[in-house]
Image (spheres, rainbow, N blue to C red):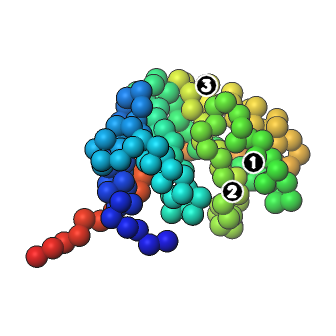
Amino acid sequence: MALDDFDRALIAATQGGLPLVPRPYDAVGERLGVSGLQVRERLAQMLESGLIRRIGAVPNHYRLGFTANGMSVWDVDDALVDQLGERIGQLPGVSHCYRRPRRLPSWPYNLFAMLHGRTRAEVEQQAVQLRELLGSACRGHDILYSTAILKKTGLRLRQSQES
């Protein structure tokens, strides 16, 4: 899908995030000289075409008080990992859950689920619940705790370098 001038302007206007106002699409539209409806429709087309994958909030878990953030990694039976991963991804303490290839012999894990808690004890209790849900399909797991906040960004367009 080729980007036209409006697409580029829309991406530039939203790449730092939507404005935190009651009607963010209207605010973006006002900056671009179009209606909020046109902004919503074009973003929907971009989603449908795969140009963008999602529109969503990117919370700062630390500022919300969730300072014990751990990526739980699981060695799950390959025949059940997709089905179980779907269930885990729906749990309230899990912000994202995905399957990744194993890197044997040193990395046997194929299912990853990010857990958030106010304490490590909360995260570990969530991991106990995940372990129970996985049942006999689980052969092992670990929790890798965050030590730094990484900058999260969405789609970015490179500025053209004109001479």
Residue at numbered disc 1 = 85
Q: Amino acid at mark 1?
A: Gly
Name the residue at 42% across, 27% down. 22
Disc 1/disc 3 C-alpha distance (Å)? 23 Å
Secondary element type, mark 1: helix
Mark 2 or mark 1, earlier in chain: 1
- In the orientation shown, which residue stands out farthest toward the bottom? 163
Asked if residue 37 is positioned above or below residue 156 in the image, the reply reads: above
- Viewer-side residue, 53 vs 136: 53
Rendered-image quadrant of the C terminus: bottom left
**Tag in front: 3 or 2:** 2
Residue marked by disc 3: 121
User: Is residue 20 shown above or below 10?
Assistant: above
Look at discs 1 and 3 and give the one toward the viewer. 1
In the picture of the structure, the residue carrying the numbered disc 2 is 99
* Looking at the image, residue 131 lies above or below residue 156: above
Mark 2 → mark 1, Cα distance in angstroms: 7 Å
In the rendering, at what x and y percent does residue 31 appear? Answer: 28, 44
Q: Using the image as rendered, state which of residue 17 and residue 22 is in the foreground.
A: 22
Does residue 151 show up?
A: no
What amino acid type is highlighted by mark number 3?
Ala
